[in-house]
Image: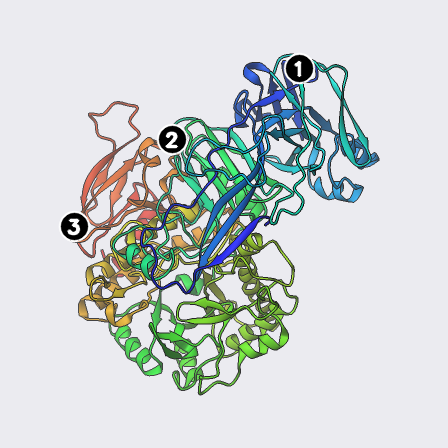
Amino acid sequence: MAGLKVSQKHHRHINNPFPSTPKRLPFIHGSLYFDSDKLLQDQSFCIGQDFQLSWSARNGGHLSISHRTQPSRSVWSTIPGEAFISAAAVQSHAEESRGSFVIHDGDAYFICKHQTIEEIRVIHETDIQKKPSDIFLTSGFPNSSNEDIRELVEESKFPILMIAGRVFNQKTNSTAKKNLGKKRLRFGCSRKSSLVARYWFLLEQKSKNQIGFHLKFGEFDQKCSPGIIYKTSIKISRWKLIRMRCQWLTCMSSNKGFVALSSHDEQEGKKGIITEFNKVFITYASDKDERFYGFGEQFSHVEFKGKRVPILVQEQGIGRGDQPITFAANLVSYRSGGDWSTTYAPSPFYITSRMKSLYLEGYNYSVFDLTKVDRIQIEIHGNCAQGRILNGNSPVELLELYTETIGRPPILPNWIISGAVVGMQGGTKAVHTVWDQLQQYDVPISAFWLQDWVGKRETVIGSQLWWNWEVDECHYAGWRELIDDFRAHDIRVMTYCNPCLVPTDEKPNKHKDLFEEAKRLDILVKDKAGRTYMIPNTAFDVGMLDFTHPKASSWFKKILHEMVDTGIRGWMADFGEGLPLDAYLYADEDPIQAHNRYPELWAKVNKEFVDEWRSDNDTNGRDPEESLVFFMRAGFRGSPKWAMLFWEGDQMVSWQANDGIKSSITGLLSSGISGFAFNHSDIGGYCAVDIPIIRYQRSEELLIRWMELNAFSVVFRTHEGNKPASNCQFYKNDNTLSHFARCAKIYKAWKFYRIQLVKEAAQRGLPVVRHLFLHYPDDKHVQSLTYEQFLVGTEIMVAPVLDKAKKEVKVYFPTTDGCSWQHIWSGKIFTRPFNHSGNIQGHEAWVDAPIGYPAVFVKCGSHIGEEFQSNLRLLKIL
């Protein structure tokens, strides 16, 4: 990204525990101008066969897009009299530390916040078939070769609509700086000087219910940027554009209504001057009470009106605002505490309570500013923008449309959703000991997940894994025999890997040195000097695979093949969020785009291997139940197509809202609305802290309540955590083992429904676990829910206990579909109270939820509910 400076903060040991809010440009406000001779008072233009754009010159001019089936319902509209396209050149400063990133806005070199509309042109297929470049050249469209244009409109349904005009503003002096602490911008230049650049905004129908948009800007001449400013939006004379010597000159029939602009001062010799736009702003209308959902996996909020949502892949942080842990994390490692917005898997996508939906394409860093009551402003860090606007009548319909385009996950193997996935460490003997205990308690088991299969080493922060992806046969003696023994009991073994490698000079019993192999093949990410970039990670430095290199994917697939050949049937594909912003890749990509794209590349490598292995499996006639599965935490918009399964990363072992058990539900529900259909968390959380003044240790009560919660997620998996000795484990005592067995059987009891929901997710993109908004979008109370309760499909509702020592929960029962809900433990029916008016959307009630009996409900009369309860009786749970 042009104008980006990167600072490394990895080795700062004492830091501000309360880091300042990143410096940002203020909300951009600009005016809209147009030629009323060319744009009539009210006009309509076709976009494809199913959409139309309406233009009105009233109140300063505005646009509105609607579907032909509902012409009076706008799916996207601008604000009367105000610019909807703006652009700027800003010096940005990125800071990073061990996977945490923050981007500040620095000097504003120029901001073109005002906009003209000079032309709205309908382009038909016959126009493209003849001489497409001529059609676009008459409006000055850049890169307008026939091939470029045909690629641009590929799969579009004609006619296409092109809106063209200019953006302009008073320019800043090259040495002037924007005062980010004030709302008002102050520039050190005369108001007589200005910058003008052309823009082209293309709207094209992509499918029956999707419109694509493309925004491009022309180059500006720093020596002479001719332009025009309309003094008012009243009727003015027409003008004609003449292309001469590769520059656009403005010729006017009269100067009435125009002010001539002076040329720019020459800025030669100024170091770091930006010569093109690197920020694009799209501003459009929003209703005051409109609520926004989505934006990927978000851990603190499900609804975002009033927030400024950054879309940048990174570590979620330790604490994320919960105290005192965020204070401590920030103190010892720069910004490692994170905040409410930091996440492994963001997505530039939303659905609103007004059934409007939009998403950005590409991988640019972007910010969705929802802080104003009447408008949205999307800030894209780049010199162009593209995305899609969706038309639908319900959240479910919009989510289906969205996932139809970005991709949906494959059906999960039956074995991974059949019983508990037991997360263990410690070597062969320790695993056998716990397995013996689980058999005594009759726990249904799908797999043992052994993340320390590669062996362990001692570092300054404790015991950590060797990132050299081969089995440590000293740590796991009899590895193949252990796998075969489990397989004889219909239990699989899963392991761990990530896209990083460490030097293994000090590892005693290695067969391969994968770091040196990758270094010789030149497939590791480089620094600016062309050397292998040794990236700080926790207590050691790592080399990171460059998957833009043509040799990297095939090399890593060989490692996966060797792992699977030992009998492994699944693995955690960890990390992917930490590609440095100053890294150099084989593909020479923009660093921020490469950073956001890396999790998808990492997932794609794993998914391609799974598909290739399955194809070979089918050819050789092996058991289809031997299918592979991997799960990962980092992602971006298109990750659901490649990642088979997600987990939510490293929650604290706490009851807190931003990074504890509550946040695990928030992340689950927000990601589900964003197309991540299969997701789950570590039972009991992961991150423990055991220092004299700050202690976060997993309690027995927290562990059991998290078991009850995850009994209703797609996968039921444990994790010992980063400090197993500090955490209560499911195998601690008779009570924990009994509750683990009970919750695993509750999970098993709805397997029949889980299979249906997994198939539905693969076919329609709907999540297994759902926010009530997906099915009750008009319910005002539902719109305000965060983590308090959720649906499993449509037939089961869960309100988990999320606070220490609580034995009852307040549950909201929606009744807009006319259904009642039955409590599975008592059989009590919750229906609409007789003393309420007929327009009530639902009602609340307190429900007992002692340990072992989470508040779970099924729809009355549902055959799914009846079978679930029947299975609970067969398993002697009910």
Q: Which of 553 and 808 is in front in this view?
A: 553
Give whichever of discs 3 and 1 has the lower sequence position: 1
Circle 2: element type: loop
Q: Is residue 621 visible?
A: no
Residue flagged by tag 1: what amino acid is it?
A: Gly
- Spot occupied by residue 662 in the image (x, y as percentages of width and height): 29, 50
Indicate whether 98 appears above or below 434.
above
| Left or right: 708, with 123 as reference point | left
Indicate whether 440 appears above or below 332.
below
For the residues carrying marks 2 and 1, which lies nearer the camera in this image?
1
Residue flagged by tag 2: what amino acid is it?
A: Asp
Give whichever of discs 2 and 3 has the lower sequence position: 2
Residue at the spot 37% in from the left edge and 53% down from the top edge: 338
- Spot occupied by residue 639 in the image (x, y as percentages of width and height): 52, 54
- Spot occupied by residue 582 in the image (x, y as percentages of width and height): 55, 59
Q: To which residue does mark 1 refer?
A: 257
Q: Nearer the viewer, residue 432 or 598?
A: 598
Q: To which residue does mark 3 refer?
A: 807
Q: Nearer the viewer, residue 332 or 834?
A: 332
- Spot occupied by residue 574 in the image (x, y as percentages of width and height): 45, 64
